[in-house]
Image (tube, rainbow, N blue to C red):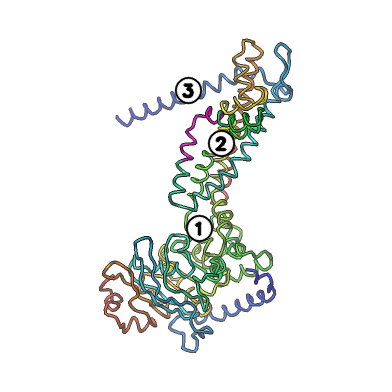
Amino acid sequence: MKRHDDNADQDLGDAADRRAHVDDRTARLARETRTPADRPDPGPDGTAVTLEDVSITFGDHVAVRNVTLEMPARQVTALVGPSGCGKTSVLRAINRLHDHTGGAVRGRVRLGSLEVYGPDVQPEVLRSRIGMVFQRPNPFPTMSIFDNVISGLRFNGVRNKRLLREMGIAALHNAALWDIVKDRLHQPAVRLSGGQQQRLCIARALAIEPEVLLMDEPCSALDPVATAKIEDLIRHLSGEVTIALVTHNMFQAARVSDNVAVFLLGEDRVGELVEVGPTEQVFDTPNDARTKAYVTGHVG
Amino acid sequence: MTGRAMQVICLIAVLIGLTPLVALVIATVSKGAGALSIGFLLHAPTPEGVPGGGISTAIVGSGEIVAYGVALAVPLGLFIALFLFERAGAIASSIRFSADVMSGVPSIIIGIFAYAVYVERFHHFSNVAAGFALGVLMLPIMVRANEEAMRTVSVDLWEAGISLGARRSRVARSVVLRGALPGVVTGNLLALARGVGETAPLLFTVASPTFAMTLLIFNDATQPFPDAQQTAWGTALVLLALVLILSTTARTIAWTLNRKTR
């Protein structure tokens, strides 16, 4: 990302501002205490990620079909549903990971106003605008804690040491990990606990200053305490970055998301998006009978 | 009782298995130690009947041949293994299959092959040709060792790198290769140790037996002169020590690199 080197000073200022901003926001982490006025403004066009009639196939197998979904900017959109209904496939379509796994994506995906599968789009540049957190914590085992955080910046060509340091520290603050790791930044990342490793992976994703953070069941390998911390962090980060969260845990979706997209398996075993809307509405007054059965625990 | 019997059988098997190795080391050391001296390592061979003389030309020659082989096989081995790591499918499978077949090809055939493509064409024997033959011999071993090492780097890590906006080549270097490094170093050094001891690929390619240790052993050991036989044993000891050092270094490097990430 050339822009980092060119606007080094400005970015440093931004990083410092953001840290202050984050500290300021910690007081209103809890969802219950958030008032409508606290809710973030939507982005310029209000939508960070748009999927239009997206279908994803692997060879002959259709994973998910005809998904149309808008993810409002700087909010948490949870993708929920039982296993195998295409949630993760949809998530990976946003940063074009299917380019490498043989999945074919049809339909349109937009990041802001950018056509993700447009002819002139370089996947690397696109991905440098999108962070991703995986099911299992996957810090680079050969790197120290701090090198993990700044690895994405390095991959994108940032060489300025001062800038790397500033942005790395800011990302660790953002991931609520700074106080835990500040005295052992140069230890191997794999010495951290599972939950801490996952937050390190979040810090690593945040360091590239993504517009969208994709989270693929980020708590599935974690214990309840670590899960609670990640959920706090998701709340903490919404409002700054658009988050797409895949989870099969309905309670988690209810706790952390602003919007919910419910995926279910159709009759021919193909994943479908059956309902999407504000979280409270989907849980309290679902429009679709299948959603109602699912969110109340009758199926799935 | 059966457990005890099993233990005894296993122990006997281990002892029988170890006997040739121990006997080989004892024989080489006892027969070769007498030849060893600083001069033996530093002086050039003398004609038969002339006292003194060493194996310096053979040591240098072997080093040169191995260096050519390494220059050919190590980079190729890395790139081919990376290709196999990144791509699945028919091409990758056929490359993998070829590598397996290649590593089973008798080394004498690789020697004849090198003779045909190099010596016959350019009309002279050369260490380059021998290095080429050794490279061809080591390549499949290195490819499979590298690939095995790279497989220990999980797809998750590869995807983490890619999802951060890194190019494939950067992920290959900073994530895959770096993660596989202990195994890559070990595998390449072990392949090298195997290559250093090869004789057949050099038979048709090296100009004189005094230009490679294994050829010198082959040549001198079959002569009726006690001096020559003593030289052969001394060279054998040097070669054995070298292979041992290479293997030990390989293990040590792997162990050190692994420990750093724990």
Q: Determine the chain carrying the residue at label 2.
A: B
Q: Determine the chain carrying the residue at label 3.
A: B
- Residue type of the residue flagged with mark 1: Leu
Q: Is residue B65 above or below residue A224?
A: above
Contact (Cβ within 8 Å) of mark 3 with mark 2: no
**Viewer-nearest of labels 2 and 1?**
2
User: Where residue A263 sits: x, y (%)?
Assistant: 34, 73
Mark 2, other Cα within 10 Å: few <14 / some 14–19 / many ≥20: many
| Residue plotted at (27% across, 67% down) | A268
Task: Examine the rendering and report whether any part of residue A144 can be seen.
Answer: yes
Q: Is residue A1 above or below residue A113?
A: above
How far apart are the two marked residues, 2 and 1, measured between alpha carbons?
A: 32 Å
Task: Examine the rendering and report whether any part of residue B243 can be seen.
Answer: no
Q: Is residue B259 above or below residue A84?
A: above
Secondary structure type for disc 2: helix
**Viewer-nearest of labels 1 and 3?**
1
Q: Which residues are magenta?
A: B98-111
The verdict on residue B49 being magenta is: no
How far apart are the two marked residues, 3 and 2, measured between alpha carbons?
A: 33 Å
- The circle on residue B157 is 1
Q: Which residue is mark 2?
A: B136
Q: Which residue is mark 3?
A: B19
**Viewer-nearest of labels 3 and 2?**
2
Q: Is residue A270 above or below residue B9?
A: below
Nearer-N-terminus badge (2/1): 2
Q: Quadrant of the N terminus of chain B?
A: top left
- Residue type of the residue flagged with mark 2: Val
Query: Which residue is most to the bottom?
Result: A37
Nearer-N-terminus badge (3/2): 3
Q: What's the magenta bit mostly, secondary-structure-wise?
A: helix
Q: Please give left or right for residue B219 compared with residue B149 in the image.
A: right
